Amino acid sequence: MSGTFLYDSLPYMVLALAIGVPAWLRNRERLSAWVMRWVDREGTGSAAVSLVVGAIIMVLWHAACFLLPHPVQLFIRSPARLFLLEVVGLIGGMMLAWGLVASIARKLSSREPGARAWLAFQVLLLAEVLNGLYIAVAYRWASAWYVSVVVPYLRSLVTLQPDATLVAQLPLTVRMHLFGVLALLLAWPLTRWLASTGAAPTLVSTREEPASQSGIVTP
């Protein structure tokens, strides 16, 4: 196990640290400012905490399976550890879904300018999370077949040698989950662009409205 780990898993961990640590050091002030804006927008209640914790669990779950497939396969050889990994993923998905529902409801009731900029993206993400929860319940032991079937397909895309032989035979709901990821990747930059371009006119109109109503002409 140790020899295999050194060659098929350790390089990914070193690469992630080599890229991630310098990136965090360069952008830690920007990241802190983004976190503060997010807290101001979402709050610090239980739903916001659930959103963050659920997102972290799901990102780590998928990243571990993708970057470290062989250690994960060795880990889930024990039925007890496989059950534990399934429970952790299910809890993370439910926490993320609850946080998204609360955030969407808050945006729908908010009158703040630009509050609904990310609404469509969050609805799409919620649909993806609910689909994943259905897959986890309907097709048990997702950790096992995800590592054996889906991860090789994703890795084949990274190496520019796509092989969809096994993925094409998966149930429709699982394939829809993969297409949902592609939809989210497309929606992310588009939503960011719409949010950045749609915020400025709103700010200008709200500032100029009182001056126009009072008859004052501003230069």
Image: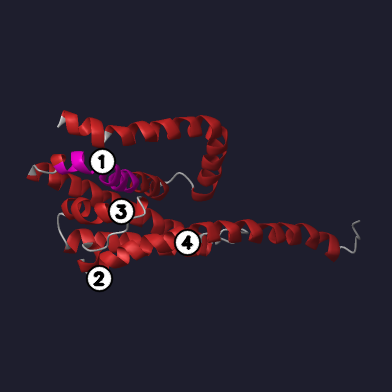
- Closer to the eye: label 4 or 3: 3
- Closer to the eye: label 2 or 1: 1
- Name the quadrant of the N terminus: top left
Question: In the rendering, at what x and y percent does residue 176 appear?
Answer: 31, 67
- CA gap, disc 3 to disc 1? 15 Å
Residue bearing the label numbered 4: 186
Q: Earlier in the sequence, mark 2 or mark 3?
A: 3
Going by the numbered disc 3, the residue's amino acid type is Ser
Nearest the eye: 178 or 108 = 178
Q: Which residues are magenta?
A: 57-73
Residue bearing the label numbered 1: 68
Residue bearing the label numbered 3: 156
- Name the quadrant of the C terminus: bottom right
Q: Residue at x 33, y 59 (%)?
A: 129
Neighbour tally class for label 3: few under 14, some 14-19, many 20 plus, Cα within 10 Å: some
Q: Residue at x 35, y 31 (%)?
A: 14
- CA gap, disc 2 to disc 3? 21 Å
Tag of residue 172: 2
Q: Earlier in the sequence, mark 2 or mark 4?
A: 2
Question: In the rendering, at what x and y percent does residue 19 appear?
Answer: 44, 34
Is label 2 in a helix, a strand or a loop?
A: helix
Q: Earlier in the sequence, mark 4 or mark 3?
A: 3
Going by the numbered disc 4, the residue's amino acid type is Leu
Q: Earlier in the sequence, mark 2 or mark 1?
A: 1
